[in-house]
Each structure stands twice: as structure tokens, then as C-alpha cells.
């Protein structure tokens, strides 16, 4: 009895502490779930660690602004559109996914683990056997497409088809980035077709939709987007020199393009070509986009461009257009509307690339961790070396930061539209491939010589994500627009010293 009486004050204090910690822990747990849109598996471990550390220490964890208990929280006005874009308020409003979206994510996870990753060996074996000049899709991809369709994992990228917001689609697309050659196409979410489908969905005529959008949505054909030209700096699209000249009821196209992704694939049936219809018009009204069936006379697919020596299955083609004649009804949108159409096409396309790159970074980190635990050097596993641990930790940090930026851009697209999200998308387009290449680079290093061969997916992953810093606009062009927006911004408080 004396003992119980002695320890009672400590016991009461301890129980109080446990109660506080549990309450805080649950709050943090819920908010972590919300922040990572609930279904972000990579954050799962983090949430548990945060929960456990809060339960043990009562410390305030990162990523959550903890409310003061017992006091009404100051209400702040809902962020305006401007706030959401400029970040002048702390944004804690990432929406949780609907039950349907969470269920699709679960299905995608099962599909990746049960079908896609096990199919990689067959895919690689087919491509090795066929040789790098072959661009026929390995049969296993068609099998995966059928399975994905049966499971409702199809056309999830297009809100009008799937009902998903970009924020809901993000973690699903991220999973597809674990196997970039197979999974995006398996769910009909692969570039450049998704961008082309978005464009036709937004601007296509009924006839264009019937002829091209429907077979693309069905996964029966593939397409390419031909804007970049070898002879001009194409990161500045006003330079595009290909001519599209009106001749009666036709347009005649003459020019040379390269990096037309997808055009090597025999299933590629149509190219969306950007070119000049009116060189005398104001700079942003000179260009037009036009649909060119790949088998039109005068279209020559010259060669495939290797990426760091590697030939992708669907390829990146140099294409010549010599007096190519198509009807005026093939214009996408309106004559002179090429720039506006490019913005409509590239906004969602860029953020989808970012989503997938996060998945690649997660896979690289998982490979790095696995290798560091099993590879023994200097008397112990590599994971025992502080320098390797630092690389692992830096990688986790960078992925989480990049993901938050990507998801924030998604949220603004969902709530305020592509235009309002432009700066955030540009930021994500710079930050995410940087993070992905840094993580993949470290994973290669931890794998030693194996990292640069084809015995791991890391070398190909590195090539793709390094190229991502060029395609859909080089980093510098995005940095230029981010800086321009920043220079025009009024800070929330005066920064001058009194
Ligand atoms: C794998 C891959 C796939 C691609 N897929 C497609 C596709 O499907 N369709 C398509 O049309 N194109 C595609 N591209 C092409 C890509 O979009 C272009 O390469 C890119 O836009 C840059 O154009 P450019 O190559 O002409 O480089 P340039 O315009 O010549 O620019 C070269 C460099 O100059 C620097 N620079 C440019 N502007 C500025 C600036 N304002 N400030 C500072 N520095 C600057 C940058 O470092 C830039 O990388 C693809 C490219 C790759 C690598």
C-alpha cells in the first residue's frame, strides 16, 4: 500500500502524459494521412515513425503544425486563388482521396506487384532478342493492357474519363513510374499519347475525336507529338520553322522534326505537328497544330535517336515532312492557336511526368536500401557505413519534398485550373527530376559496377530522368518563368529593415 501511495503521483503524471501523447499522436497521424493523400505508401513508414516518436517523446513532429489544445484556433480566411499559387499562406488543405480513388490505388498496387513487375523479365528478354532497331511492342504489354482494363485501371489520367482529380491520380501514376517501360502503357497513361488525348479531348472536333481520340482511348493505336526541330532552339517555340501553308482545302507541310517520341512504334498512326501558318502574325499567333496521319505521302521517319546509347521501344524519331498534304479539317483548335494548344497539352503532361518520376525515385531508393543491407565491404554491410546512411536519408528527404510540391501543384490544378497552377507545375518540373536523378545516381553508386549495366533498371532510369530535365521544357526555361513570376510578386509583409 505504501508503495502504491508513493508511486501514485508518478503514475498519474505518466497516465496524463500517455493520454496527451496519444491525442497528439492521433492528430499527427491523421494529418500525415491527409497530407500524403492517405494512400501514399511511401509515407506509411514515416507516419508510423512520427506516431511512435510522438508517443514516446511528446515532441512535435515535422510536417504538421500542431494546434494549441484548449484554445479556439484562429480562423483564417480560406486561401484565395492567389494565395494558393504564391504560397503566402501555409497550405494545409491537400484533399483526401475519395473512397473510389483509394480503392483504385489499392488495385494499382496489387496490379504492379502481381503483374507488372513480374512481367519485366519477359519484356527485357523480348527486346534483347529483337535488338535495339526493333520497335515492336513486346506481347507482354498487350497482355498487361487487357488485365488492367478488366480491373478498371484504364484512362485514369483523364478526369473526364476516370472521375479522378489530379491529386487522386498522382499516387496511382507514381506507382506506374516504378516500371516506366511497362506500367504507364499498361494503364493507357503513357506519354506522349496522354498529352495528345488531352488535347483532342479539349480541342478536337467531333470527327477528330471519332478518328483519333477514340482509338487512342481504347489503346488500339499510338501517336506522336512533333514540335522540336534540329535546326532551331526549340525550347523557345517561337523559333519553330516548319511551314504549314494553306492551299485550297488543304494544308501543305514542309519541315524537319526530331525527338518525336513514339513515332518509331509501328502502332503510331498519327502525329500532331506544330508549325508556322502565318510568319507575319504576332509571335504567339504564328503557330498551328495539325493532325498528320503517319502514312501520309511525304512523311519519312528517318531514324531513332538513342537516349545515352539506349533505344526506347516506342522510340524518339527524326521525321521529315516534304510537301505533306492534309485537309484543313485536320487543324487542332484554330489556325494560329498552336501556342495556346501547347499550353493546354503540356500542363497536365508535365505534372504526370513528375508523378511517375517520384515512383522511379522510390524504386531506386528501395533498391539502394536493399543493396546496402546485403552487400558486405570492410567487415560489414554497406548500410553500416555512415556515408551510405546519409545518402539514404538525403534521398528520402528529397523524395518527400518533391512529392509535396508535385501534390500541391495537383491540388491547385484541381481547384483553380491549369493556368493558376502554371508556376507550381514549373517548380515541380524542375524539382522532381532533380530529386529523381539524385536518388537514382546514389543508388547506382551503392550498386557499384552493377549499377551502370542492365542487371538493374537503374542505368535506364537514370537516362530517362536526366532527359526529363530537357523534355517538356529544359530546366532553365522553367526557372526563367518561375523567376519572372517571383519578380512580379508583392511579398505578404514589407521585408525592408526599419
Ligand atoms: C527523351 C526526349 C523525349 C522528347 N520528346 C519530345 C516529343 O515527343 N516531341 C517534341 O516535340 N520534342 C520532344 N523532345 C525534345 C525536347 O522537348 C527539346 O529537346 C527541348 O524542348 C529543348 O529544345 P532543344 O533541344 O532545341 O534545345 P535548345 O532550345 O537548343 O536549348 C538548349 C539549351 O539551352 C539552354 N537554354 C534554353 N533557353 C534558355 C534560357 N531562356 N535561359 C538559359 N538557358 C537556356 C538550356 O540549357 C537548354 O537545354 C524530347 C527530348 C528528349 C530528350
Image (tube, rainbow, N blue to C red):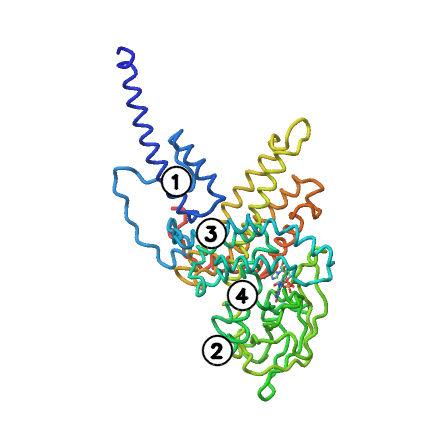
Distance between mark 2 and mark 4 Cα atoms:
18 Å
Distance between mark 2 and mark 1 Cα atoms:
48 Å
Q: Secondary structure at mark 3?
A: helix
**Which tag, 1 or 4, sits closer to the chain's start?**
1
- Which residue corresponds to mark 3? 105
Q: Position of residue 498 (x, y in %)?
A: 38, 46
Disc 3 C-beta below 8 A from ligand 1? no
Q: Which mark is residue 29?
A: 1
Q: Nearer the viewer, residue 485 or 206?
A: 206
Q: Is residue 483 visible?
A: no
**Which tag, 2 or 4, sits closer to the chain's start?**
4
Q: Which mark is residue 195?
A: 4
Q: Nearer the viewer, residue 440 or 210?
A: 210
Q: Residues within 10 Å of mark 2 (few under 14, many from 20)?
A: few
Q: Position of residue 203 (x, y in %)?
A: 48, 73
The N terminus lies in quadrant: top left
**Which tag, 4 or 3, sits closer to the chain's start?**
3
- Which residue corresponds to mark 2? 206
Residue contact at pointers 4 and 3, CB within 8 angstroms = no
Q: Quadrant of residue 474?
A: bottom right
Residue contact at pointers 2 and 1, CB within 8 angstroms = no
Q: Position of residue 358 (x, y in %)?
A: 54, 50
Amino acid at each position: 500500500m505504501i508503495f502504491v501511495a508513493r508511486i501514485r503521483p508518478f503514475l498519474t503524471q505518466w497516465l496524463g502524459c500517455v493520454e496527451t501523447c496519444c491525442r497528439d499522436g492521433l492528430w499527427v497521424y491523421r494529418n500525415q494521412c491527409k497530407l500524403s493523400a492517405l494512400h501514399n505508401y511511401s509515407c506509411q513508414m514515416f507516419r508510423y515513425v512520427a506516431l511512435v516518436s510522438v508517443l514516446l517523446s511528446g515532441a512535435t513532429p515535422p510536417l504538421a503544425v500542431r494546434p494549441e489544445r484548449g484554445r479556439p484556433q484562429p480562423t483564417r480566411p480560406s486561401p484565395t486563388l492567389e494565395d494558393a499559387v504564391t504560397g503566402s499562406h501555409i497550405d494545409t488543405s491537400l484533399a483526401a482521396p475519395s473512397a473510389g480513388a483509394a480503392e483504385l490505388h489499392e488495385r494499382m498496387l496489387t496490379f504492379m506487384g502481381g503483374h507488372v513487375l513480374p512481367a519485366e523479365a519477359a519484356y527485357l528478354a523480348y527486346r534483347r532478342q529483337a535488338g535495339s532497331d526493333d520497335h515492336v511492342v513486346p506481347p507482354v504489354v498487350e497482355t498487361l493492357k487487357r488485365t488492367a482494363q478488366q480491373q478498371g485501371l484504364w484512362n485514369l489520367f483523364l478526369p473526364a474519363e476516370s472521375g479522378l482529380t489530379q491529386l487522386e491520380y498522382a499516387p496511382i501514376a507514381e506507382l506506374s513510374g516504378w516500371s516506366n517501360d511497362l506500367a504507364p502503357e499498361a494503364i493507357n497513361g503513357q506519354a506522349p499519347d496522354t498529352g495528345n488525348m488531352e488535347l483532342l479531348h479539349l480541342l478536337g472536333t467531333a470527327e477528330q475525336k471519332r478518328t483519333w481520340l477514340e482509338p487512342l482511348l481504347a489503346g488500339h493505336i499510338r501517336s506522336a507529338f512533333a514540335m522540336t526541330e534540329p535546326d532551331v532552339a526549340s525550347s523557345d517555340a517561337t523559333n519553330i520553322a516548319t511551314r504549314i501553308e494553306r492551299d485550297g482545302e488543304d494544308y501543305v507541310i514542309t519541315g524537319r522534326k526530331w525527338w518525336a517520341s513514339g513515332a518509331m512504334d509501328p502502332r503510331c498512326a498519327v502525329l500532331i505537328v506544330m508549325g508556322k501558318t502565318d510568319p507575319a502574325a504576332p509571335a504567339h499567333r504564328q503557330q498551328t497544330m495539325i493532325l498528320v496521319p503517319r502514312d501520309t505521302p511525304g512523311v519519312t521517319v528517318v531514324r531513332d535517336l538513342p537516349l545515352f546509347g539506349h533505344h526506347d521501344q516506342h522510340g524518339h524519331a527524326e521525321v521529315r515532312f516534304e510537301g505533306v498534304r492534309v485537309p484543313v479539317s485536320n487543324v487542332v483548335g484554330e489556325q494560329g492557336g498552336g501556342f495556346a494548344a501547347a499550353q493546354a497539352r503540356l500542363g497536365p503532361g508535365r505534372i504526370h511526368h513528375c508523378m511517375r518520376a517520384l515512383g522511379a525515385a522510390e524504386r531506386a531508393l528501395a533498391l539502394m536500401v536493399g543493396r546496402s543491407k546485403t552487400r558486405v565491404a570492410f567487415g560489414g554491410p554497406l548500410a553500416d557505413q555512415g556515408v551510405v546512411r546519409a545518402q539514404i536519408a538525403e534521398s528520402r528527404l528529397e523524395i518527400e519534398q518533391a512529392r509535396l510540391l508535385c501534390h500541391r501543384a495537383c491540388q491547385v490544378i484541381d481547384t483553380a485550373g491549369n493556368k493558376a497552377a502554371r508556376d507550381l507545375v514549373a517548380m515541380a518540373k524542375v524539382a522532381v527530376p532533380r530529386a529523381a536523378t539524385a536518388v537514382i545516381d546514389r543508388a547506382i553508386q551503392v550498386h557499384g559496377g552493377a549499377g551502370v549495366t542492365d542487371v538493374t533498371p537503374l542505368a535506364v532510369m537514370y537516362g530517362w530522368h536526366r532527359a526529363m530535365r530537357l523534355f517538356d521544357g529544359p530546366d532553365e526555361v522553367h526557372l526563367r518563368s518561375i523567376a519572372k513570376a517571383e519578380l512580379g510578386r508583392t511579398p505578404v509583409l514589407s521585408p525592408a529593415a526599419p
